[in-house]
Amino acid sequence: MDSFNPDDVAIRSGHYIGGEYVDVEAGERRIEVARPSDGVVYASVPLADAGMVDRAVENAWLAFKHSGWARMAPRERAKILRRFAELVEADAPMLGRLEALGSTRPIAQAIGWDVPFTAEGIRFYAEFADKLGGDVAATDHDHLGMTIAEPYGVIGAIAPWSFPLVMASWKIAPALAAGNAVVLKPSEMTPFSVLRLAELAVQAGVPAGIFNVIQGDGRVTGDELVRHPKISKVTFTGSTRTGASIMAACANSGTKPVTLELGGKSPQIVFADAPRLDDVARRIAGAITGNAGQVCVAGSRLLVERSLAEPLAERIGKIFAELKPGATWAAGTTLSPIISAPQAARIEGIVGRTLEAGATLRYGGVRADGGADGAFYSPTLLTDVTAHSEAVREEVFGPVLTLQTFDTEEEALALAQHPEYGLAAGVHTADLGRALRFVRGLEAGTVWVNRYGRTSDFMIPTGGFKRSGIGKDLGRQAYEANLRFKSVLIDLRA
Ligand code: NAD
């Protein structure tokens, strides 16, 4: 994919309700949107207030009731969703540019991974549409007992700024396949690519009003969406703190079921017998520098058997040095910008305080030069840290790796458990028994063995334990979470 000029990308702003852009209304508050790569404010979005949220949800509710989406033959729904996936793929040049322009995703990755992964996720859930309708229960001969799977109605979906298209698709695809309508609120920092996604859904034949997008912040728009009485279920990806307040809002506005995909502080445990040290180093470095560490499952805590610490650190340092920070519209960029200046300052603060408390700076620890005015942070390795160090405890959401050593398996497992988070973990060893002991022992929603990061096996769900979340995205679990199950018992003697 070639570089592109960010000023050449046409931006369509507004809410997308009932298959149409809702233009700015007089007096509506607006939010300025900046490009992470150079900090330039390139557009603005309206902020949906209670009235606009109500309009979107009512519209979705009417479409759910009357458009035929929930009632059509599931294979028909699947056909439309497959067409939607094809349109997403075909639109890669446009969608990829929109994604790269407004988020931290370099264009080569946006086109090479984000867009096709979004399309394939939609296709995956299309295939579920006619596979799960309920069960017949074993009852005595005089009764027929069943569970019938039904869509909820209108799902409220709230997405983060990291991977805007992919994160949104993990919400909308299972919801739509199950026959629901959706009102999606993207992050106010990355509002545009999902508008295009909703347009493509309608072009594919998803009835107008079934997939809506509203723009706004969390405090007003997100909160109004979550609390709306006609939202039957909420699905959220974002920080643990916001997740907790959404859970409270769901409890106080109709005991709504909620899926929460939240923060993490995931360990990577490397034993001295791990095969092919160069590959291990590449995996470890990739897991903290991908999207500049702005990944929920970033492998941010390296735990390494003492004898291997030095050779592994050296190799990681060399890989860090290969990365090329740059604007997301430059074809050669391999290190993403940080989403915003305040977030870069936060990273700097955590690293600075961890060093003041006694840590050693092995690599990085400074702003990087991305050739643009955006915020770039150099891949950083901190050693001489403990479980109490700020950079070990807190989710940094930046390219900051901490290194701790261990001598025994027990010590490694104890260090790996985080007091609050339990999103993902990686174990690197040649010993199968040890790998499986870690699979059993780790408090993490996903454990990767001798790899780090997901493949395109969408059947494997993702989701955290402890304060990393509730429920799953992807897999059969996410499809089922978009259905409610009605129990039926019929007396055949009547
Ligand atoms: P955030 O919690 O600040 O915001 C996420 C979304 O919630 C945004 O759309 C925001 O506008 C909205 N929001 C904020 N306050 C709200 C409220 N009170 N009510 C309703 N909506 C509200 O998170 P972020 O900074 O956008 O994303 C980074 C975080 O997301 C990190 O913690 C990261 O680990 C997490 N994340 C988790 C996963 C996962 O799958 N577990 C994936 C990606 C990101």
Image (cartoon, helix red, strand yellow):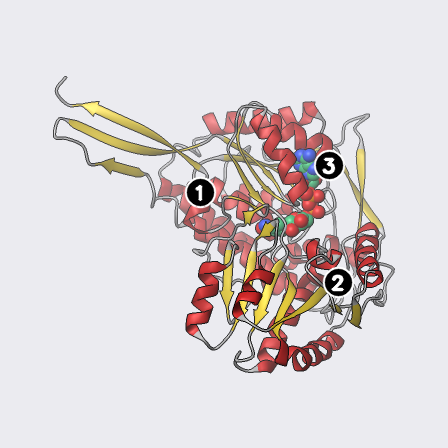
Q: Quadrant of the N terminus?
A: bottom right
Residues at marks 1 and 2, CA–CA distance in whole angstroms? 33 Å
Label 3 SS: loop
Q: Is residue 478 visible?
A: yes
Which quadrant of the render holds ligand 1?
top right
> What residue lies at 55% left-to-right and 32% top-to-bottom?
209
Residue holding disc 3 = 217
Q: Is residue 15 visible?
A: no
> Callout 1, which amino acid?
Ala
> What residue lies at 23% left-to-right and 30% top-to-bottom?
145
Q: Percent x, y for residue 224?
A: 66, 27
Q: Percent x, y for residue 69?
A: 44, 34
The label number, if any, that marks residue 38 in the structure image: none
Comparing 358 with 139, the one in front is 358
> Callout 3, which amino acid?
Asp
Residue holding disc 2 = 329
Q: Is residue 142 left or right of residue 170?
A: left
Tell me: residue 214, above or below residue 280: above
> What residue lies at 67% left-to-right and 68% top-to-bottom?
404
Q: Percent x, y for residue 311?
A: 66, 82
Comparing 343 with 158, the one in front is 343
Mark 3–mark 1 CB contact (< 8 Å):
no
Residues at marks 3 and 1, CA–CA distance in whole angstroms? 27 Å
Q: Quadrant of residue 144?
A: top left
Residue holding disc 1 = 177
Mark 1–mark 2 CB contact (< 8 Å):
no
Label 2 SS: loop
Disc 3 Cβ-to-ligand 1 distance below 8 Å: yes
> Callout 2, which amino acid?
Trp
Q: Residue furthest right?
A: 373
Label 1 SS: helix
